[in-house]
Amino acid sequence: MSENDVILVTSSYDHTFIFWDATTGQLKEEINYGEKVIVNRIDISQDKKHLAAGGNFFASYYDVISQKKQPVYVYDGYKNNITGIGFLKDSNFFYTCSEDGYIRIHDLRSNNLSREYQEKEPLNTICLHPNETELIVGDQMGNVKIYDFQQNKVRLKLSPCPEVGIRSISIAYNASQIVAADSQGQCHTYMMNNMDLTEQSLLYKFEAHQDYILKASISADLRYLATCSADKTVKLWTLNEKNLGNDKYPKWELFSTLYGHGKWVWDCAFSCDSEYIITASSDLTTKIWQTDSAAVLRTLKGHKQAVTSLSINDIAID
């Protein structure tokens, strides 16, 4: 694979990664990562050179360019499932959160841990702040915490939904807002001032689904919020300038509901131009949808069990 390729990869409970041709929907390559291994989350580095995977008691990364089918590095020091994973923008580090309460940053250059923090509660989701110095996590007790990993401390703790697990957090690329989605189907929306989140930043909450939200994602152009759920649907939301919340900030309103999956929808991701959204489901399929029309363009079939995670990198590299 080259740096100019669109890289779309999915992982499944069938113990495989599949690399897809996003244009044709054809399977390009399949990697079996071991019968005893379960992968929960994957991410592709910004330079398209590495694939990070997190699962039951381990984190690993693969060399995408060489297409070797064995991981370059495996860290097996986790005591429970990894629930979130992602790369820092320089692609030399990836971070994880896990149900054992740990946040870890792995250094690909030395194959060692760069940072490690531990919380008392199981962690369900993690995302990187655009300032590249903070990680935002959501835990099983309904808390959102911001870790400053340069200062090695928790800078802020919020409790938008006490005793209700935060399942997914998404932050706008310009840090204008953050959405925390919970296991009761609610989205909690915060507006950030000067890239900063405070206790007073909560704008409003709204019911997106009547069942678990498994993933929330804000599109790169800030036009859409996607939520995917155990109710088998994906919902697209758009900001309505006429419907204003606190501080006269536009609220998210339902734009369309994507029907077509037959079981839980575990993951979703927008293309870089927000023209398409890709979804992964327990019904063994991955679907590529046109965002504006909510039409299914392609259904990718190849996995033999639930498709639980996906990652796409379609950004051109200079």
Image: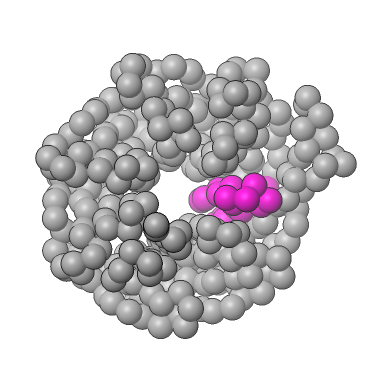
Q: What residue is at 64 percent from the left and 47 percent from the top?
A: 222
Give residue 92's position: percent from left, percent from top. Answer: 25, 43
Give residue 87's position: percent from left, percent from top. Answer: 34, 45
Residue 307 is at least partly visible in this image: no
Q: Quadrant of residue 63?
A: bottom left
Q: Is residue 261 above or below residue 83?
A: below
Give residue 162's position: percent from left, percent from top. Answer: 55, 26
Q: Nearer the viewer, residue 126 or 207?
A: 126
Which residues are drawn in magenta? Answer: 208-232
Q: Is residue 162 above or below residue 81?
A: above
Q: What residue is at 60 percent from the left and 23 percent from the top?
A: 194
Q: Nearer the viewer, residue 271 or 164?
A: 271
Q: Is residue 20 above or below residue 224?
A: below
Residue 286 is at least partly visible in this image: yes
Can residue 122 be found in the magenta stretch?
no
Q: Quadrant of the C terminus?
A: bottom left
Give residue 316's position: percent from left, percent from top. Answer: 44, 61
Going by the image, does 65 lie left or right of 215? left
Can residue 217 be found in the magenta stretch?
yes
Q: What residue is at 83 percent from the left and 35 percent from the top?
A: 244
Q: Quadrant of residue 242?
A: top right
